[in-house]
Image: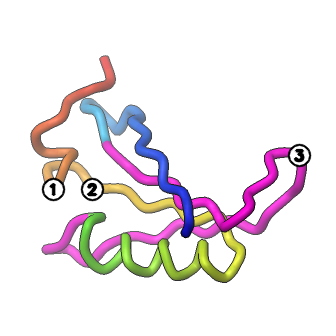
Amino acid sequence: MTKKEQVTFLGRHFGLVGDIHFPDNFDSSKKYAAIVVSHPGSSNLDQTSGLYSEKLAEKGFIAFTFDAGYQGRSVVENLVS
């Protein structure tokens, strides 16, 4: 099973929430190809882009997806000051 880690980072004026998906047997001393996956306009990271990121991690990529401003977890969590 792939590992997923939640991260927060600063957007223009607010905190954004994202998930980094790691491949099975991830080794931090090795290099991996990474892909950023964005979601459709009316979606969030727990839907399409999260599923794609999980599948990409299963294929050996590091995949990052995030909720755009005012969508999903980025709506309710202003975690970055």
Q: Main secondary structure of the magenta part?
A: loop
- Residue carrying label 3: 29
* Magenta stretch holds residue 41: yes
Report the Cα–Cα distance between label 3 and label 1: 34 Å
Report the residue that reaches farthest toward the front: 1
- Please name which of the two marks, 3 or 1, marks the residue nearer to the observer: 3
Which amino acid does the dot numbered 3 rest on?
Ser
The Cα–Cα distance between marks 2 and 1, rounded to whole angstroms, is 6 Å
Q: Earlier in the sequence, mark 2 or mark 3?
A: 3
Color encoding of the figure = rainbow
Tell me, yes or no, whether the two marked residues, 2 and 1, touch with CB atoms within 8 Å: yes
Q: Which residues are magenta?
A: 17-44
Say whether disc 3 or disc 1 marks the residue closer to the N-terminus.
3
User: What residue did someone put label 1 on?
Assistant: 71
Mark 2 vs mark 3, CA separation in Å: 31 Å
On screen, residue 42 versus residue 45, left or right, reads: left
Identify residue for label 2: 68
| Secondary structure category for the residue under label 2 | loop
Q: Nearer the viewer, mark 2 or mark 3?
A: 3
Count of numbered marks? 3
In the image, residue 74 sits, relative to residue 45, either above or below, namely above
